[in-house]
Image (cartoon, rainbow, N blue to C red):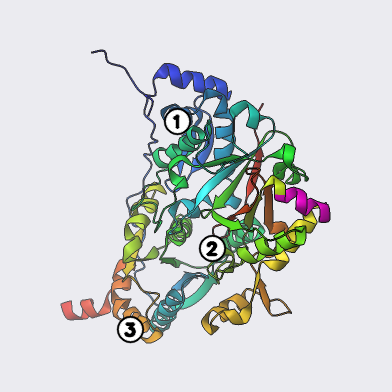
Amino acid sequence: MSKGIVLDPTSSFSHDIVSSGPDVGDLAGRKIGFRIDMLWRSWDWVSEIWAEMLRADGAEVSFWRSMGRTAEEGVRMNAEMNAFFDGVDTAIVGLANCGSCTSWTIHDALAAAGRDIPTVAIATAHFEGLAHALAKRGGRSGLRLQILPYPLDILQKEQVHAIAREQYRSLLRTLGVRDRLAQQSAA
Amino acid sequence: MIPPTEERVQQHIVAGQRYPDETIAILPPLRSEATAEKIAINAVMAGAPAAAMPLIYAAIEAMADPDFDLAGLNATTGSVVPAVIVNGPIRHRLGIPYGAGLFGGVEGSAPGIGRAIRLAMRNIAGQHVGTTSKSVYGNPGRIAGIVIGEWEERSPWAPLAERRGVPGDAVTIYGAMGTANICDVVADSGIGLLEMIGKSLAYPGANGFLPSTAYSETLVVINPVWADLIAREFPKIESVQEVLWDKAALPIDWFRPEYRKPIDALGRIRADGRVHLVPEPKDVLVLVAGGEGGLHAHMVHSWGACLTVTRPIAA
């Protein structure tokens, strides 16, 4: 039997940042920007609750809504996104709740993380693996992810609000916020 | 699958007239560098003829255009595959089908070319169902692609690529959410056919009616017999597009209230209370192809806000 050599049809990739980036530390005075979208009402509902709670904890909160990402609108969206992330010092980016929106959520989260600001991408459980894979291939496997239950968008507003409230402290831990309650109990 | 030996790959690279380490495109979802060599390796494996390499390179370059949103398309839950539409004399040289059975089943090089591009999406771009592709149903075209030509010689209108600014050998990439048939055995006029085709395009779950889609396109493939009949009444392709666009609309009250609000927010409800499948007549792409048996048209709905891209094929 003779042997032959065949060439590798796959592509390799080596660049990666495993660090999750800087922590938020204290919330007071933080300028936190939510990237929301045109697809998921559940993400609007989660972000409005988190925004309310973050404001109560002393942060300033602003929103930017991503719309179409192709043609002239796509160019405008990229410019808006860059201006938005330039104006905040913490980014909460979602929602990875379908294939293409996971792709764009991670795309935008990587743009924020590239500014060396605390950044978290929000994904529902079904899309967690895709979000991780895209973050890694985007060169930042350490990108913070906060995972919401799936399916989320078929729930009623009150149910989604309840999930947002339950997940708030977990979000703060993911972002590296100093946990006052934990510090108090340790003291 | 043909083993990609160094010699075979070299022949394909030479035929493609590119340097082996030349980056043809960066391909999502994994943002991989698709070099001429990597693409050629996949083309050899797929059994694509070496002479098709300029077409394959042009197609992959076109797919990577930001307007096509390949990052979203390759990862989506949708059942989409980039269709490759070929214009120009290269159709004859490569045997790209444009007549009977063009969407599948006809002999020729199209399945090998399509398979080469699909393998590149898997092996280079990293599109794997279940991990980086979340497609709920997939698409038969994700196996050997959709590679078709236009029957330019039987079309009463200018070729699709030429109308899009690229005369001669050209490739047009379209985000195809599967194909569906439109049959008519009654119509005896151009307007009758266009009305049947236009109304058939407009079903509420079509991509163009998504409340999250501000704009999209649709593709209609008209057989040459019908094209002749239509052209007698509509010698200009713009008039054909206008009628199809007008008929491909639904009254907003067909939609439940929870749909109406986001559609309205996108400014898509016209003064007459209708929502059109696509924003403007130019967004209805028309192609003449298919067998001379007539009787059928094909409609190919698009995906998301992905926009069609046309590129020249290097001589």
Mark 2 vs mark 3: tell me if same chain: yes
Q: Position of residue A149 (x, y in %)?
A: 31, 71
Q: Is residue B7 above or below residue B211?
A: above
Secondary structure state at the residue bearing disc 2: helix
**Which segment did they paint magenta?**
B226-235
Q: Which mark is residue B38?
A: 1
Check disc 3 and report the residue beneath it: A162
Q: Residue at x 68, y 53 (%)?
A: B285
Q: Residue at x 58, y 63 (%)?
A: A68
For the residues carrying marks 2 and 1, which lies nearer the camera in this image? 1
For disc 1, the chain is B
Secondary structure state at the residue bearing disc 3: helix
Q: Is residue B123 above or below residue B271?
A: above
User: Label 1 vs label 3: CA separation?
Assistant: 50 Å
Q: Position of residue A66 (x, y in %)?
A: 54, 66
Give the total number of marks visible in the rendering.
Answer: 3
Q: Position of residue A8 (x, y in %)?
A: 36, 29
User: Which badge, 2 or 3, is on the more N-terminal residue?
Assistant: 2
View extreme (top): residue: A2
Tell me the kind of residue under disc 2.
Answer: Asp
Q: Residue at x 56, y 42 (%)?
A: B101
